[in-house]
């Protein structure tokens, strides 16, 4: 089972400059909230945003939702002060942007540890061509990496590519990041869809990402939540099939056979491991959704 395994079907960015949004995020059915100090925040609002996020995280109220703080770039004038401010306020993880190498990961951890955050897990954003090419190096840099988050909008811009419904320009990049994440037991989450009114395209992106192997999707608007949560939630039929796989292969093993056929498909031990993961994820999602009601 992956390190820091938990549902991350939806990871909603919440700007630190807007206290209404910070408050509202406490009531939304999102698995994770990413309280944002990064690029979308105007320069004149950076320090106020930091103060807001510190206040809201300390106050709590986010329930079972994972609370993540995205800091500014490490080489910016705000990055290190962000880390010092949020290292011990009770957030679940710090999301570091523009991570492009294993060295960047170690630098982020060093700064976080120096700020008193040795207990914290981190997340890393993959948002440039060099970061994609170095995804294996990044994923292997530390077992404190809970999640790799793709920044697809940035990546498309840097590739000089075009946004299309089929996402053809970035499929190779996404696959490389997924491969690296899975090789080292990391959660991996798809990037945003900035056209938040085009739900047809958004739903397609969610289901494509799910089928590729992502754990969930990062979002910019609450209206996207139902689609992302639905796409990444195991269906009742999938849960039942997973149980059948586990039971059938166990019975086959007890009868002296190493494989079994379930619903006309050959089942081996690796299918059982996948089925066990799916059942565990389903249980965790059920508990999380219960806490929202």
Image (cartoon, rainbow, N blue to C red):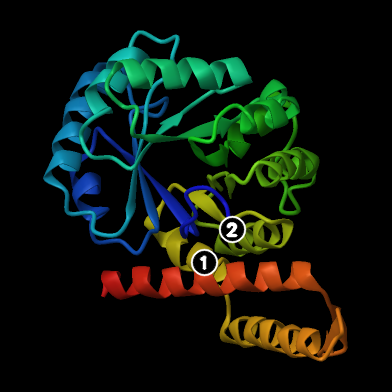
Q: Residue at x 37, y 26 (%)?
A: 71
Left or right of 41? Residue 280 is right
- Marks 2 and 1: CB-CB under 8 Å? yes
201 lies above or below 108 = below
Residue 227: which numbered mark, if any? 1
92 lies above or below 154 = below
Q: Which residue is at the front of the view, 50 or 5? A: 5
What is the crowding at mark 2: few (fewer than 14 residues within 10 Å), some, or many (at least 20)? many
290 lies above or below 50 = below
Q: Secondary structure at mark 2?
A: helix
Quarter holding the C terminus? Answer: bottom left
What is the crowding at mark 1: few (fewer than 14 residues within 10 Å), some, or many (at least 20)? some
Q: Residue at x 69, y 26 (%)?
A: 137
Task: Give the percent coordinates (x, y) of residue 207.
Answer: 65, 64
Task: Give the percent coordinates (x, y) of residue 215.
Answer: 58, 56
Q: Residue at x 35, y 20 (%)?
A: 113
Left or right of 7? Residue 163 is right
Of mark 2 and mark 1, the one earlier in the sequence is 2
Left or right of 275? Residue 6 is left
Q: Residue at x 76, y 39 (%)?
A: 176
Residue 202: which numbered mark, if any? 2
Choose top left, top right, bottom left or bottom right for residue 49. top left
Task: Give the percent coordinates (x, y) of residue 42.
Answer: 32, 22
Would residue 73 be visible to someone looking at this image?
A: no
Q: Secondary structure at mark 1?
A: helix
Task: Give the percent coordinates (x, y) of residue 76.
Answer: 41, 10
């Amino acid at each position: 089972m992956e390190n820091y395994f938990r549902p991350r079907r939806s990871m909603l960015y919440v700007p630190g400059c807007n206290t209404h949004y910070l408050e509202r995020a406490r009531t939304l059915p999102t698995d994770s909230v990413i309280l944002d100090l990064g690029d979308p925040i105007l320069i004149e609002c950076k320090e106020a945003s930091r103060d807001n996020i510190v206040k809201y995280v300390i106050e709590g109220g986010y329930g079972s939702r994972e609370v993540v703080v995205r800091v500014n770039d490490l080489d910016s004038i705000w990055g290190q002060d962000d880390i010092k401010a949020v290292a011990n306020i009770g957030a679940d993880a710090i999301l570091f942007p523009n991570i492009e190498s294993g060295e960047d990961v170690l630098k982020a951890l060093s700064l976080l540890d120096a700020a008193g955050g040795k207990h914290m897990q981190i997340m890393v954003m993959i948002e440039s061509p060099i970061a994609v090419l170095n995804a294996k190096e990044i994923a292997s840099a530390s077992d404190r990496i809970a999640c790799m988050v793709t920044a697809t909008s940035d990546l498309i811009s840097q590739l000089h590519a075009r946004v299309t419904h089929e996402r053809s320009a970035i499929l190779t990049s996404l696959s490389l990041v997924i491969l690296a994440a899975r090789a080292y037991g990391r959660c991996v989450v798809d990037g945003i869809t900035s056209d938040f009114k085009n739900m047809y395209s958004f739903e397609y992106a969610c289901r494509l990402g799910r089928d590729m192997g992502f754990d969930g999707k990062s979002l910019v608007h609450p209206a996207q939540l139902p689609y992302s949560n639905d796409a990444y939630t195991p269906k009742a039929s999938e849960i039942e099939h997973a149980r059948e796989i586990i039971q059938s292969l166990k019975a086959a093993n007890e009868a002296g056979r190493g494989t079994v056929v379930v619903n006309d498909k050959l089942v081996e031990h690796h299918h059982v491991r996948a089925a066990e993961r799916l059942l565990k994820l389903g249980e965790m999602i059920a508990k999380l959704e219960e806490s929202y009601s």
